[in-house]
Image (cartoon, rainbow, N blue to C red):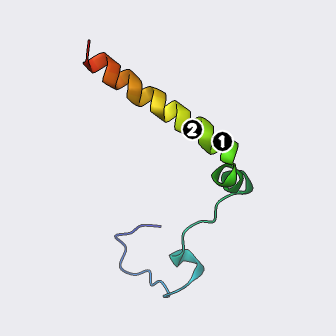
Amino acid sequence: MNPYNKDIKTKAYSSNSYSTLPTRTTRFFRKCVIWQFLRFLVLNLKIMRIIVGGHS
């Protein structure tokens, strides 16, 4: 679909107007506390590597 084509008319509140729904896997990872904790640790390790590298 060409966004610059003025000939195509879209309906308001049609199914094309809404975003896509997350998959079952995406919803699982969003709710999984263990996965969130692991990602938290990985992010903290990345931040600490940057901080320690800047102080040497």
Residue at image coords 47%, 67%: 1
Q: Residue furthest bottom?
A: 12
Quarter of the image with the C terminus is top left
Q: Nearer the viewer, residue 30 or 48?
A: 48
Where disc 2 sits, the SS reads helix
**Residue type indicated by callout 1:** Trp
Residue named by callout 2: 39
Left or right: 45, with 34 as reference point: left
Give the CA distance from mark 1 to mark 2.
6 Å
Left or right: 42, with 47 as reference point: right
Please tell me whether residue 55 is drawn above or below residue 41 in the rendered image.
above
Residue at image coords 61%, 36%: 38
Label 1 Cα crowd, 10 Å radius (few <14 / some 14-19 / many 20+)? few
Q: Residue furthest top?
A: 56
Residue at image coords 69%, 49%: 32
Image coordinates of residue 54 in percent, x first then y, are 26, 20
Q: Nearer the viewer, residue 42 or 12?
A: 42
Label 2 Cα crowd, 10 Å radius (few <14 / some 14-19 / many 20+)? few
Which numbered dot is residue 35?
Answer: 1
Image coordinates of residue 34 in percent, x first then y, are 68, 42
